[in-house]
Image (cartoon, grey):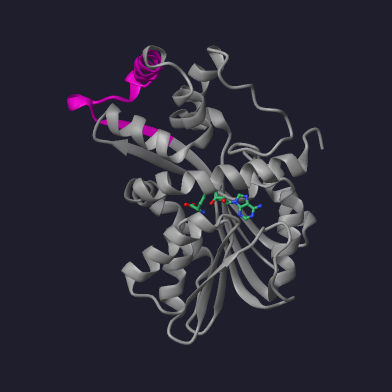
Amino acid sequence: MSFDANAHRDASLQGWEEAAAGWVRSQELLREFGAPVSHWLIDAVAPQPGQRVLELAAGLGETGLLAAELVAPVGGAIISDQAEAMLSGARERAATLGLSNVEFQVLNAEWIDLPVASVDVVLCRWGYMLMADPAAALGETRRVLRPSGRVALAVWDAIEHNPWASLPGAELRERGLTPPPVPGAPGPFALGSADRLRELLEQAGFAELRVQTLQLHRRHAGFEEFWETTLDLSRPFHDAVLARPQTEIEEIRAAVRKRLEPYEAAGGVLDIPGRTLVACASA
Ligand SMILES: C[S@@+](CC[C@H](N)C(=O)[O-])C[C@H]1O[C@@H](n2cnc3c(N)ncnc32)[C@H](O)[C@@H]1O
């Protein structure tokens, strides 16, 4: 590996603990943006009443909590994430939904603290590409699945299909505020190739693979909402921008707005495309 895996793990944990409050603040927008992905993942594994579901890198548990409703009342879901602060948000969401068949577990998906063959379904939306060793995490996923158990996952497609991220990112890079991505290092777009994803799933021993792309829309009432949501959801963006003096923050804001103009419609409404890869497979 051309990056320091343990340094990445420490920084990732700290960053996501810090990001959780912003994720809770922006959770409704995130839910709308990510709903087609969650529904694809759930349909792909078709959780049945009585089954045990594990969600990895769950964040606020948006996908796993949908599955919990389907496996109730006898079955249940384990909503897991490395970051305790994310799981507190997930606990609140489960309480709002009135779900009682859900457990929460802090765990690193690269070494899942659960017995062999102990779950029927694993779900992971936008998690594996952030892990230091996604191959290890997929191996662990298969280990905890019962024979013929199913995994469904989403990872971002290549960054050029995701202007909601590439355009603000380019502004910061051109200003020298963030480094260019290190090839082979984890990050939001690190697994943005269907062939690579297929290869990783095959190497982990999965069968009956299905990999496809899903087109998404990041919709905002106006640029202000996009800006605030981006500060809430992306810790690297938040840290790089807010470390600058106020006048420069205003310049960055105006420059990002300009870059997004092609996606602005009447009344300032933004509709920015995104593309994710989704996959499912059998253990
Ligand atoms: C982009 S967020 C996605 C959250 C959620 N799955 C969703 O789609 O809304 C990534 C989440 O992955 C978690 N994560 C990253 N690396 C992890 C690892 N190695 N083990 C467990 N969780 C991890 C982070 O803490 C964060 O909550």
- Please say if 102 is above or below 246: below
On screen, residue 105 versus residue 171, left or right, reads right
Viewer-proximal residue, 166 or 83? 83
x, y percent for residue 225:
29, 34
Q: Which quadrant: the N terminus? A: top right
The residues colored magenta run 249-273
On screen, residue 46 versus residue 9, left or right, reads left
- Please say if 139 is above or below 32: below
x, y percent for residue 18:
51, 44
x, y percent for residue 148:
68, 74
Q: Is residue 191 magenta?
A: no
Residue 213 in view in this figure? no
| Quadrant of residue 94 within the rendered picture | bottom left
Residue 53 in view in this figure? yes
Q: Identify the residue at horizontal 59%, vertical 50% (top origin).
A: 127
User: Please, which residue is most extreme toward the right here?
Assistant: 1
User: Please, which residue is most extreme toward the left here?
Assistant: 267
Q: Which quadrant: the C terminus? A: bottom right
On screen, residue 23 versus residue 147, left or right, reads left
Q: Identify the residue at horizontal 71%, vertical 35% (top origin).
A: 185
